[in-house]
Amino acid sequence: MQGSTDNKHAHKHSHTGHDHAHGHGHSHAPADRKGLLIALIITGGIMLLEFFGGLITDSLALLSDSGHMLSDTASLALSLVAMIFAVRPASAKNTYGFYRFEIMAALFNGVTLFVIAGFIIWEAVKRFGSPPEVASGTMMIIAAVGLLANLVSAWSLMRKSRGHDNINIRSAYLHIVSDALGSVGALLAGLIMSLFSWYLADPIISVVVALLILRSAWGVVKQAFHILMEGAPPSVDSGAVSAALRDIDGVMDVHDLHIWSITSGLDALSGHLLIRDNASHQAILQQAVRLIEQDFGIRHVTLQVENSAMEHGELKV
């Protein structure tokens, strides 16, 4: 006997030995895509401004930030494409749909942050020996414009988007925030060079910004990799879920319990319940499904209910 339940709507059908309750949700509102699109346009424009500004002023801080923003422009575009793909319906070939495209986009975005940070550090180290003279005044003006644009992009993304817990949105947001850090670093370096003509400030602050970028990138990469490895959601204690199911009257054992995330905000659970021979399969199944949804927030549930007459081989996972 088996049951499952999902998001938004529910319909039931029955056949020998099975009773299912299904629903399908987790769609992204147009507002999510609008926020990403606005951020993409702003970031692309400032990228060009900082690139040419860096060439004119010979500022590594500006050039490195424009390189970072090039990555961000591509990453925001990828996040937007991933969000469009994610709403495509499931098919016989892709039974979970394309939700994982968002996770792969987030992982790619996190990895690109590592690459950009490494490039910035490499270039900064080469400049430590003989830092070039930088046109700090022009550099500060361009950095200020970049910072303002980054703040507008971040505000637009968070205000327009309702998926704050979505790792795809989060990775895009972190790219924008790291851009803002780069602009702040460029402003600070420009101020120091303007006041003290200490041009070593440019590569030093660039390294500091790169390290901050690495710190943010690690969180995104770690979370995306955890989801792709079918790890249990951080918000769900699998031990507590197992104990709660065992506490249901009539349940003797819980085994082969698996909890994972299909994508951000869409968790799933499967498992086997061994019950007493005289217990009501349907009553226990209904109670278990409701408990998991209400206590642990998991709506995509598949449970196989067994008694002593059921025999199956040992599962590998």
Image (tube, rainbow, N blue to C red):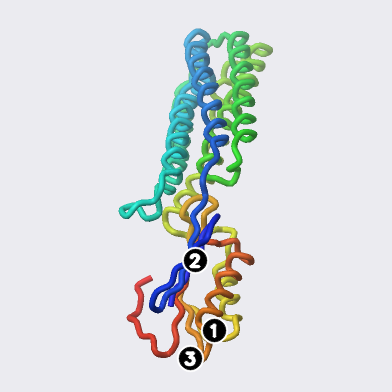
Q: Residue at x 63, y 17 (%)?
A: 144
- Mark 1 vs mark 3: in front: 3
Q: Nearer the viewer, residue 208 or 152?
A: 152
Q: Check disc 2 and report the residue beneath it.
A: 21
Image: 111 above or below 296: above
Q: Kindly identify the amino acid type of the residue bearing the numbered disc 2.
A: Ala
Q: Check disc 1 and report the residue beneath it.
A: 251
How many numbered discs sit on the rendered protein?
3
Q: Kindly identify the amino acid type of the residue bearing the numbered disc 3.
A: Asp
- Mark 2 vs mark 1: in front: 2
Q: Residue at x 51, y 60 (%)?
A: 6
Q: Residue at x 62, y 14 (%)?
A: 140
Q: Residue furthest left?
A: 93
Mark 1 surroundings: few (<14), some (14-19) or many (≥20) residues within 10 A:
many
- Which element carries disc 3, helix, strand or loop? loop
- Residue 184 in picture, x, y percent from top left: 63, 24
Q: Kindly identify the amino acid type of the residue bearing the numbered disc 1.
A: Val
- Residue 217 in picture, x, y percent from top left: 51, 40
Q: Nearer the viewer, residue 89 or 212?
A: 89
